[in-house]
Image: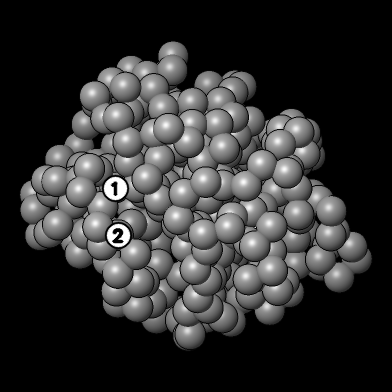
Amino acid sequence: MSKIQSKNIQANGINQYFIEAGEGAPVVLLHGFPETNYGWRHQIAALSRQYRVIAPDLRGYGKTDKPVDGYDKRNMALDLRELMRALSLEKVALVGHDRGARVATRFAKDHPEALDRLVVMDNVPTRIVAREFNAKMAKVYWFFMFHLVPDLPEALIEGREEAWLRYFFSAWSHNKAAFTKEDIATYVDAYRQPGAVRGALADYRANSVDVTQDMADADTKIRVPTLSLWGAEFDGVGKMFDMPAVWAEMADDLRTYAVPGAGHLVQEEQPEIVNELLLDFLKGWNG
């Protein structure tokens, strides 16, 4: 594996922290909740043998700035576009999981000239979640509503970050052996940083703006080759939605795959399968 470098760049008005490894065509990895860019540790090791891998902490997460606003997905996609400009990158292959997939999807629509191909992991697009929401979904997506409440979640989570995070890592994973004590401790430390819990919640609290943005260009298909992966064992995505049909609404040039033995945290639960799928999909990407 290439040496991993930690870097900071001021872009789109915030300090963005990212890790980078390898040389060649650029591949950007966008994490989701409840993770940081640490969630890509298994992918960085595999992909950096052939590609220049860049894994930012999203706005509000990890070591990136945590401003009070700017969490709508159009602006978070602009965070990436400005980071690319700062790094003199004209075009990337983009991989997003969960919240990062929402940013990546908005990036694909807002900045198609800067994108060669797209991977989205265990994610149902925001407008489709809103369209299909019902009582059955509410039982699984309860945290969406909880995270939207102003101030109360922060008050309840402060000092209890480990319990909050352990719930999600346990409830959302099928292969629970994928996470060591050290892995959980790394995430807990990240979310104990000043503003980190509020930043993650602000990501969710942009939901109404995100839906409005997504509805405005709902008929615009993603132009680039797209791969949608999801955990076959997760109640909130693969077991609840017809994922090939969901993503056929979003992209015409589409591949889909349900990853066996994985829940929501697919790239951490089944890294060997995911890495093989990514490397196959990235073939031909030469920068």
Q: Secondary structure at mark 2?
A: helix
Residue 155 placement: quadrant = top right
* Quadrant of the drawing holding the C terminus: top left
- Of residue 241 and residue 135, the one placed in the foreground of this image is 241
- Residue 84: where, in percent of width, then height? 32, 28
Image quadrant occupied by the N terminus: bottom left
1 vs 2, front mark: 2
Q: The residue under label 2 is which amino acid type?
A: Leu
The residue indicated by pointer 1 is 27
Instruction: Say if mark 1 contacts mark 2, CB within 8 Å.
Output: yes
Q: Amino acid at mark 1?
A: Val
Residue that label 2 marks: 282
Count of numbered marks = 2
Q: Reading the chain from its start, which is encountered first: label 1 or label 2?
A: 1
Horizontally, is 221 left or right of 22 in the view? Answer: right
Q: Residue at x 63, y 61 (%)?
A: 247
Q: Residue at x 53, y 50 (%)?
A: 101
Q: Residue at x 34, y 64 (%)?
A: 281
Q: Residues within 10 Å of mark 1 (few under 14, many from 20)?
A: many
x%, y% of residue 137?
Answer: 81, 66
Residue 110 vs 245, above or below: the answer is: above
- Residue at 69% of width from left, 69% of height from top? 245
Measured along the vertical axis of the image, is residue 206 above or below residue 258? Answer: above
Q: Position of residue 214 (x, y in %)?
A: 71, 39
Camera sees residue 127: yes
